[in-house]
Amino acid sequence: MAVLQIVRFRAKPEVSDEEMLQVNERFQREVAPSLPGLERREATRTDSGDWVLVLRYADMDHAAGGAARDTSPVAMEFMSKIDMATLSASFHPVVSE
């Protein structure tokens, strides 16, 4: 059963909008296509600076291990720009398509 992962966060105060947009775009192009079980990744950003990522995985096994499997330099750079105090993630099995 497919699973959606919803990730919410804010960038660190010293990280500019442009920096965060650039590293997100690199992650989208260079990392996301190679993550096992990841079927889709979408990123949104509000005017107030909140980010929401919606990731669709093939199943819970892939969703639960997604972040731990990627230790690439781009992923590490992306994570280094996040204010970890604002980070939350939740998993939601898809019940209807």
Image: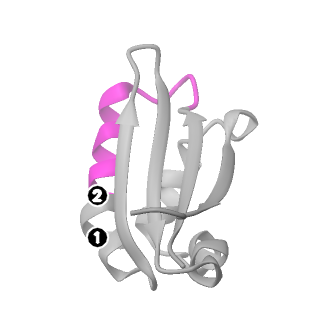
At x 53%, y 25%, the residue is 14
Which corner quadrant of the image does residue 3 belong to? bottom right
Which corner quadrant of the image does residue 87 belong to? top right
Regarding mark 1 in the picture, which secondary structure is present there?
helix
Comparing 10 with 91, the one in front is: 91
Q: Is residue 86 left or right of residue 70?
A: right
Q: In the rendered image of this protein, does residue 91 appear above or below residue 45?
A: below
Label 2 crowd (10 A; few <14 / some 14-19 / many >=20)? some
Q: Quote the CA–CA distance across marks 1 and 2.
A: 6 Å
Q: Are marks 1 and 2 in contact (CB under 8 Å)?
A: yes
* Mark drawn on residue 26: 2
Amino acid of disc 1: Glu
Q: Tag count in the figure?
A: 2
**Measured from the top left, where is residue 70 in percent x and y?**
53, 76
Label 1 crowd (10 A; few <14 / some 14-19 / many >=20)? some
- Name the residue carrying label 1: 30
Amino acid of disc 2: Arg
Predominant SS of the magenta segment: helix
At x 45%, y 83%, the residue is 37
**Measured from the top left, where is residue 47 in percent x and y?**
38, 15
Q: Quadrant of the C terminus?
A: bottom left
Question: Which range of residues does the magenta coloring cover?
Answer: 12-27
Residue 20 showing in the rendered view: no
Q: In the rendered image of this protein, does residue 3 appear above or below residue 51?
A: below
Q: Is residue 17 magenta?
A: yes
Q: In the rendered image of this protein, does residue 87 appear above or below residue 62?
A: above
Q: Is residue 25 left or right of residue 27?
A: left
Residue found at the far top of this picture: 48
Figure colour scheme: one colour
Q: Quadrant of the N terminus?
A: bottom right
